[in-house]
Image (tube, grey):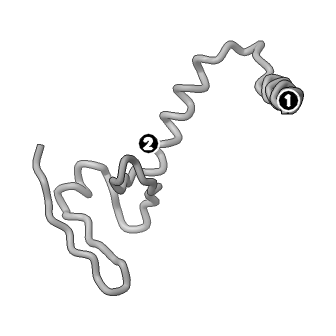
Amino acid sequence: MQAFEIAVTQQGRMVIPSLLRKQLGLKSGSRLMAHLENGRLILEPKELLWEKIYQEMSAIPAKTDLAQELIDERRESAGRE
């Protein structure tokens, strides 16, 4: 794994090294999603994040009513309070 040092400007801007941009297929205007994970800043291409979501959702049986499951969980939780 190759590591790169990236400077943050006064405005909070960073430049992603060209090698990393090429490996991720990033071009001008590409969108990234950012989140914190165990004190680390994670940047992911938005398309990659959507792919992960679709993969996880495809494992749920088509008959499953997620909205109803959430309602049932909330009612159960409220009943315990």
Give the residue displayed 47% in from the left and 46% down from the top. Answer: 47
Give the residue displayed 85% in from the left and 29% down from the top. Answer: 71
User: Is 59 left or right of 66, judged from the image as shown?
Assistant: left
Give the residue displayed 32% in from the left and 86% down from the top. Answer: 10
Q: Quadrant of residue 16?
A: bottom left
Amino acid type, residue under disc 2 in the picture:
Leu
In the image, residue 79 sits, relative to residue 60, either above or below, namely below
Q: Position of residue 57 (x, y in %)?
A: 61, 26
Q: Position of residue 46 (x, y in %)?
A: 48, 50
Q: Quadrant of residue 73?
A: top right
- Local packing at callout 2 (Cα closer than 10 Å; few below 14, some 14-19, many 20+) is few
Q: Nearer the viewer, mark 2 or mark 1?
A: 1
The disc placed on residue 5 is none
- Precedes in sequence: disc 2 or disc 1: 2
User: Is 9 left or right of 37, judged from the image as shown?
Assistant: left
The quarter of the rendered structure image containing the N terminus is top left
The disc placed on residue 71 is 1
Give the residue displayed 22% in from the left and 55% down from the top. Answer: 20
The quarter of the rendered structure image containing the C terminus is top right
Amino acid type, residue under disc 1 in the picture:
Ile
Q: Position of residue 72 (x, y in %)?
A: 85, 24
Q: Position of residue 33 (x, y in %)?
A: 47, 55
Contact check, label 2 and label 1, Cβ < 8 Å? no
| Mark 2 lies on residue | 48
Task: Name the secondary structure under disc 2.
Answer: helix
- Local packing at callout 1 (Cα closer than 10 Å; few below 14, some 14-19, many 20+) is few
